[in-house]
Amino acid sequence: MSDDAFPNDVAILGGCGHVGLPLGIAFADRGARVVLYDIDENAVKLVNDATMPFREDGADEKLVAVVNSGLLRATTDEAAVSTAENVVIVVGTPVDEYLNPDPHAIPRAIRETAGSLVDGQLLVLRSTVYPGATALVERLVAELAVKLDVAFCPERIAEGHALKELVTLPQVVAARSERGRNRAAALFSRLTEQIVFLEPEEAELAKLFTNTWRYIKFATANQFFMIANDSGLDFEKIRSALGHDYPRAADLPGAGFAAGPCLFKDTMQLAAYTNNNFALGHAAMLVNEGLPAYIVSRIEQRYALQHMTVAILGMAFKAESDDIRSSLSYKLRRLLTVRARRVLCSDPYVRNDPRLVPLDDAVAAADLIIVATPHKQYAGLKPTVPVVDVWNVLDHGVRV
């Protein structure tokens, strides 16, 4: 794909993060020459040393291979962006403390790197964007003294399974022009034969709908859990029974913390897009974000929390992950800190929280254990104190 004008095939802005790095590894694994531009000096050094900055299934071995082959490198030098035919931006749309999206985050990133964009490049927006962001970028590009094609090709991977899903799931490609659409399709055809074409506005909503749908499903399960639990019944026993050889209920998830950097944020983006007329999304937010408080309230009804040491097992936002972004385990810890005598937290994967203690120490000191993240290693625990296990990791039911 590369020629003399573009010695690299792909440059990824924000390339050492959870979206950009797996994508870069996947492209390099398929023979593309990839440069990752990132302002995080520590992450750049780790990648160039062929060390993953975070957990991602199958990534450690592949990173070593593509770095050693010279197909992938990371840099803090913005000028590297000009060396690639395809520039992928993985900067998303953040939501502020008032739940308002910032649609200017991506245009701001483009303006900051405009000096490194050159004629003939394809500019690909990869992360979730607020509806209309692609059109906003198109207008911005038109004002620049550089000729670029623009496409929106949203990532659709589940964190931790990116390298598998990037080459097995269909890739959505959206561009205003036929040339931009064809170039984006050619780029992502390096990963998969399945390309789904949409218009940019359709693709923007498709991405938001996907994450919001998952968030609403989790809220439904959590609301069902609360209804059953308030009646003294085990939601997991009911869920298992109603889904037994009954396909119309097979997709009902179990209860648990619906967290992470995307689902809540994207639901609030969709709410803002509808002028806050998205009652279903707001209701889902209240249920999911309220689950830690519900659990603490139920515990207080049964135990004298003020005299107890509580161990929270799992601080990452999902199982077998080291990512704590938007993890509701931390909300649970804040709530318990003012109610319990002492709170101890443990996680086998999280490394950037000095307040965590080893699992054995947390279990040994606990008067009550809460399984907050369903890491597989917790399934073998045989605690002698009460356990709150909404995920049913211990297979003893989920009643609180």
Image: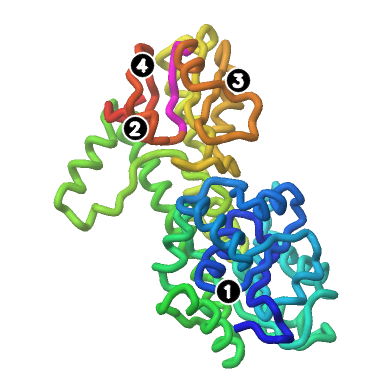
Tell me how far mark 2 sits from mark 4, CA to CA: 13 Å
Label 2 sits on residue: 393
How many neighbours does mark 4 have within 10 angstroms: few (below 14), some (14-19), or many (20 or more)?
some
Q: Quadrant of residue 7?
A: bottom right
Say which residue appears at 58% left-offset and 46% top-offset: 54
Judged from the image, the secondary structure of the residue bearing numbered disc 1 is loop
Question: Of all residues shown, which one is farthest toward the left?
Answer: 245
Q: Position of residue 53 (x, y in %)?
A: 62, 47
Say which residue appears at 41% left-offset and 39% top-offset: 256
Q: Is residue 341 highlighted in magenta?
A: no
Q: Nearer the viewer, mark 2 or mark 3?
A: 2
Residue type at numbered disc 3: Thr
What is the span of residues highlighted in magenta in the rendered image?
A: 366-372
Tell me how far mark 2 sits from mark 1, CA to CA: 41 Å
Closest to the observer, 132 or 107: 107
Residue type at numbered disc 1: Ala
Label 3 sits on residue: 337
Judged from the image, the secondary structure of the residue bearing numbered disc 4 is loop
Say which residue appears at 18% left-offset and 42% top-offset: 241
